[in-house]
């Protein structure tokens, strides 16, 4: 609930602010401010999307989504990131155009806007600092970027006010945009890893296999699959060969897994005989294709 409320507050703050900012950029003639506005509108849109998807992601699993809705939160992160990528590319493009066609800038106005920008965004970042979903992290990253962006604009405005180097305006906006671009790409990679069911960061299948094999009563472990729904909760499924008491073996395995940061596990237990049979089959399949069928007919 806390995360949602935070996201909503951030959304309202951001949207109203980016409108204010857009006019500010036009009035002062600063591309750094306009570019920040573009980035803020992107932020606001993505935060709005995050809000609805975060809400949806909290729903309990049902027949349609047997794994639950956690990935919706991750989807929010994808959309946010893509919007930011576009925004930052546009900003860089406009800033370059501006370098070759300089425009008169009202520095005093720019300084005033930048001070307001730093203060408001700092408050927004402070409000949204809690929460641990990927979505929330993305939102908070935006907020911090905004504070940084404005701090840069403020320093730049003061410098230009006294030196009149107007090209600084474009250089600053390119800097801010490049920063956003790099972060967005990193974020996108993390999210895609989740969608591609990559083994979560910091988890080694090899190591888990070794540790489980060492547990009393475990003869063999295979078909290990580890994935994460949302970047926080890790899931695993595996087949365990054992001739020992099932509950006891399962309990030790679950304990071992939770030490590796896996909280949900589905364990399939097989007896030694079933295992032999299965292996035997595999061997036969491999060595002689047609031979196997022949067997069955007798």
Image: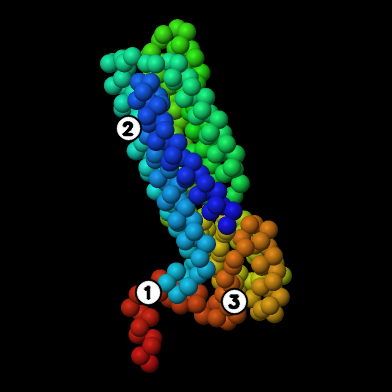
- Work out how far the residue at label 2 is from the one at label 3, CA to CA, in angstroms: 55 Å
User: Disc 1 vs disc 2: which is toward the camera?
Assistant: 2
- Residue at 50% across, 70% down: 61
Closer to the observer: label 3 or label 1? Answer: 3
Q: Which residue is mark 1?
A: 288
Q: How many marks?
A: 3
| Residue under numbered circle 2 | 90
| Between 152 and 63, the one nearer to me in the picture | 152
Query: Mark 3: which secondary structure?
Result: strand
At a point 33% along the width and 14% down the height, the residue shown is: 104
Mark found first going from the N terminus, 2 or 3: 2
Q: Nearer the viewer, mark 2 or mark 3?
A: 2
Helix, strand or loop for disc 1: loop
Q: 262 above or below 77?
A: below
Marks 3,1: beta carbons within 8 A: no
Q: Residues within 10 Å of mark 2 (few under 14, many from 20)?
A: some
Residue 39: tell me if it is visible.
no
Q: Quadrant of residue 239?
A: bottom right
Is 261 or 152 nearer to us in this picture?
152
How much space separates mark 3 and mark 1, taking CA atoms?
29 Å
Secondary structure found at label 2:
helix
- Nearest the camera: 280 or 16? 16
Badge 1 density bin: few <14, some 14–19, many ≥20, Cα 10 Å? few
Seen at 47% across and 44% down, the residue is 12
Q: Position of residue 201 (x, y in %)?
A: 55, 49
Mark 3 sits on what residue?
A: 269
Whole-percent x, y for residue 156 in the image: 47, 17
Percent position (x, y) of residue 14?
46, 40
How packed is label 3: few (under 14 Cα within 10 Å), some, or many (20 or more)?
some
Distance of label 1 from label 2 (alpha carbons): 61 Å
């Amino acid at each position: 609930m806390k995360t949602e409320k935070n996201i909503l507050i951030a959304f309202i703050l951001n949207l109203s602010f980016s409108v204010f900012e857009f006019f500010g950029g036009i009035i002062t003639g600063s591309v750094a401010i306009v570019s920040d506005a573009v980035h803020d509108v992107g932020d606001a849109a993505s935060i709005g999307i995050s809000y609805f998807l975060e809400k949806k992601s909290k729903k309990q699993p049902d027949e349609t989504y047997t794994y639950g809705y956690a990935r919706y939160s991750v989807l929010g992160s994808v959309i946010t990131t893509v919007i930011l990528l576009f925004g930052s590319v546009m900003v860089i493009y406009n800033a370059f155009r501006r370098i070759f066609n300089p425009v008169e800038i009202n520095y005093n106005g720019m300084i005033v806007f930048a001070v307001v920008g730093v203060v408001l965004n700092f408050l927004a970042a402070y409000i949204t600092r809690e929460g641990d979903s990927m979505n929330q992290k993305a939102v908070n990253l935006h907020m911090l970027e905004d504070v940084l962006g404005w701090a840069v604009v403020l320093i730049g405005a003061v410098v230009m006010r006294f030196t009149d180097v107007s090209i600084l305006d474009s250089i600053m906006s390119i800097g801010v945009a490049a920063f956003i671009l790099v972060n967005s790409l990193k974020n996108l990679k993390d999210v895609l890893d989740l969608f591609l069911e990559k083994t979560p960061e910091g988890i080694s299948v090899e190591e888990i296999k070794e540790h489980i094999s060492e547990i009393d009563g475990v003869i063999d472990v295979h078909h290990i699959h580890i994935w994460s729904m949302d970047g926080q909760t890790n899931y695993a499924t595996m087949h365990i060969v054992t001739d020992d008491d099932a509950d006891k073996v399962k309990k030790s395995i679950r304990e071992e897994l939770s030490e590796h940061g896996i909280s949900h596990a589905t364990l399939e237990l097989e007896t030694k005989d079933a295992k032999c049979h299965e292996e035997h089959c595999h061997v036969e399949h491999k060595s002689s294709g047609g031979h196997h069928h022949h067997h069955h007919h007798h």
